[in-house]
Image (cartoon, rainbow, N blue to C red):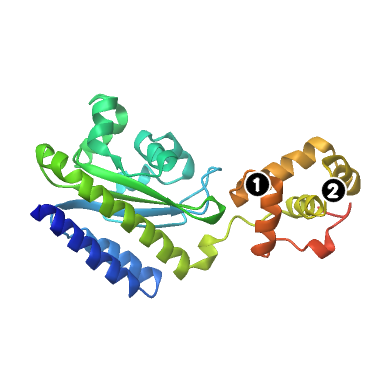
Amino acid sequence: MSSIIEDAEALRLTVAALTHVRNRDQLARLIQRMATFDGVRFLGFTYWRGLEYDRPVDWCATTFPPEFHAMFGSSASVRRHKVAHRSISELVPVDWLEVSEELGMDHPDVRSALAMGLTRTGLSCAARGHGRNFGIFYVNFDMPEDQWKSRKLSLSACVQLIAIYIHQKLVELCPELGTPDVLSTRERACISLAAEGKKVKQIAHLLGISEQTVNFYLSRARTKLGVTNTTHAAVLAAELGLVDFEDAPIRSAV
């Protein structure tokens, strides 16, 4: 019971400290100080504005070895990594020990982590925001595996909440990071006309492009905005000021 109380107190102090952070440098320093907590070996938080394309990291604060950070240097590398991909797809804390036992000690992801000095006792948790931006909070703990099994439940709750708080704080401090990728002129034109009730065939005629191309631009816009239908994309684009429905470009769009 005492370990659960200690974990809860560490969570309370961390959240309290996050409320006083005023810029991204302070946030990075706080994350680095968290790595000095009792039982923590390495700790880091990595943020992307989107994971759909092969893109570099938008923000990162970590005490992990450089080789570990290099494994997550792009969104494509994150999607390939078994543990990171599971964090993203499930949005719940992923237990490194559990995953390593599933993959086996000979799996390259497991071998490379151990070669860097990491233990198998760790957690990764992703937090998601508007426009499919993602943050992944990952913590490697320095504790025996038998002790880990009794503490991972309370630690998972702490990691999940801290991941959400850090993600929200970063977007609050840097609003530009919370804005989806800027829509291209063609994407804005297609979304604007679709919001007016135009069908794909009509949009294609008005813009002088093929229906297949219209569908391509609408699909890219939905992906950038993190939604599954065009109506929602149009509403979100308007809310974020990414389109102007009063002046939808016709044919002259480039």
Q: Nearer the viewer, residue 173 or 6?
A: 6
Residue at the image position 32 percent from the left and 69 percent from the top: 18
Which of the two residues, 42 or 180, is positioned nearer the viewer here? 180
State which tag comes first along the sequence, 1 or 2.
2
Is 214 placed above or below 107 here?
below
Q: Secondary structure at mark 2?
A: loop
What residue does disc 2 label? 198
**Amino acid at pointer 1:** Arg
The quarter of the picture where residue 30 lies is: bottom left
Provide residue 238's location: percent of width, then percent of height: 70, 61
Q: Quadrant of residue 99?
A: top left
Q: Is residue 43 left or right of residue 40?
A: right
> Does residue 64 appear in the picture of this structure?
no
Q: Judge the density around disc 2: few (<14), some (14-19), many (≥20) Cα neighbours within 10 Å.
A: some
Query: Horizontal and vertical percent for residue 142?
Result: 14, 47
Horizontal side of residue 187 vs 55, given as left or right: right
| Picture residue at 49% right of the left edge, 55% below the top | 129
The residue closer to the viewer here, 227 or 21, is: 227
- Tell me the kind of residue under disc 2: Lys
From the viewer's perspective, tell me whether residue 76 is left or right of residue 215: left
Between the residue at mark 1 and the residue at mark 2, the CA separation in whole angstroms equals 17 Å
Is disc 1 surrounded by few (<14), some (14 to 19) or many (20+) residues within 10 Å? many
Residue furthest front in the image: 1
The residue under label 1 is: 222
Q: Is residue 69 above or below residue 145?
A: below
Give the number of the mark in front: 1 or 2. 2
